[in-house]
């Protein structure tokens, strides 16, 4: 999924502001790691972020990427998604949205739904604890994998 340039710029501006407000150094490595997540709609895991940043900064370490991603999460600049193929995925889209996750290829795509945004917490969940956010994850087979399966059976 292609992210609009204006959305990427808004995310980068939010990053800069959050660093200033937290009194954190705005390092080149942090900037490039956040940019890698901010410019993609694929919800990359740490390894994917590392590979992307490494093309621009060959000296970056995987450890730095991991530490920075969790630091960005703690700052509230990115969210994590539930385990997809045993890896945590990262998302810089902080707007209310939900996810479709392909159980075959792992592709994760945002989608928007006013109905899902307005879900009411059932009593059972309220008894467990207080919800901070509601985000729906739909797991299934994406259209690309479904088409591939259909062509294999023909």
Image: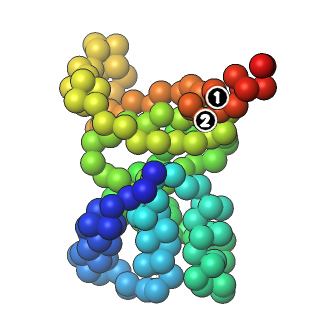
| Image position of 122 with respect to 1: above or below | above
Which percent across, then down, holds residue 53?
A: 58, 75
CA distance separating discs 2 and 1: 5 Å
| Image position of 2 with respect to 116: above or below | below
Which percent across, then down, holds residue 56?
A: 58, 82
| Image position of 55 with respect to 147: above or below | below
| Quadrant that contains the C terminus | top right
Q: Residues within 10 Å of mark 1 (few under 14, many from 20)?
A: few
Q: Nearer the viewer, residue 144 or 18?
A: 144
Q: Nearer the viewer, residue 100 or 85?
A: 100
- Give the quadrant of residue 99: top left
| Image position of 143 with respect to 105: above or below | above
Residue 104 in view in this figure: yes
Q: Secondary structure at mark 1?
A: helix
Q: Nearer the viewer, residue 26 or 117?
A: 117
- Give the quadrant of residue 72: bottom left
According to the image, label 1 marks what residue?
147
- 43 on left or right of 110: right
- Residue 9's label in the rendered image is none
* Residue at the (50%, 82%) spot, across then down: 29
- 74 on left or right of 145: left
* Residue at the (57%, 49%) spot, across then down: 88
Residue that sits furthest to the front in the current view: 154
The reply to whether the C-beta atoms of the residues labelled 2 and 1 are less than 8 Å apart is: yes
* Residue at the (48%, 34%) spot, across then down: 100
According to the image, label 2 marks what residue?
144
């Amino acid at each position: 999924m292609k992210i609009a340039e204006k959305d990427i710029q808004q995310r980068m501006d939010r990053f800069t502001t959050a660093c200033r407000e937290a009194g954190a150094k705005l390092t080149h490595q942090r900037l490039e790691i956040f940019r890698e997540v901010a410019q993609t709609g694929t919800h990359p895991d740490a390894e994917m972020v590392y590979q992307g940043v490494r093309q621009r900064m060959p000296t970056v370490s995987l450890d730095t990427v991991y530490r920075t991603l969790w630091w960005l999460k703690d700052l509230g600049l990115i969210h994590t998604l539930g385990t997809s193929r045993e890896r945590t995925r990262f998302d810089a889209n902080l707007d209310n949205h939900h996810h479709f996750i392909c159980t075959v290829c792992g592709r994760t795509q945002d989608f928007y739904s006013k109905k899902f945004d307005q879900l009411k917490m059932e009593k059972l969940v309220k008894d467990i604890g207080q919800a901070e956010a509601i985000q729906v994850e739909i797991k299934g087979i994406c259209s690309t994998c479904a088409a591939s399966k259909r062509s294999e059976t023909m």
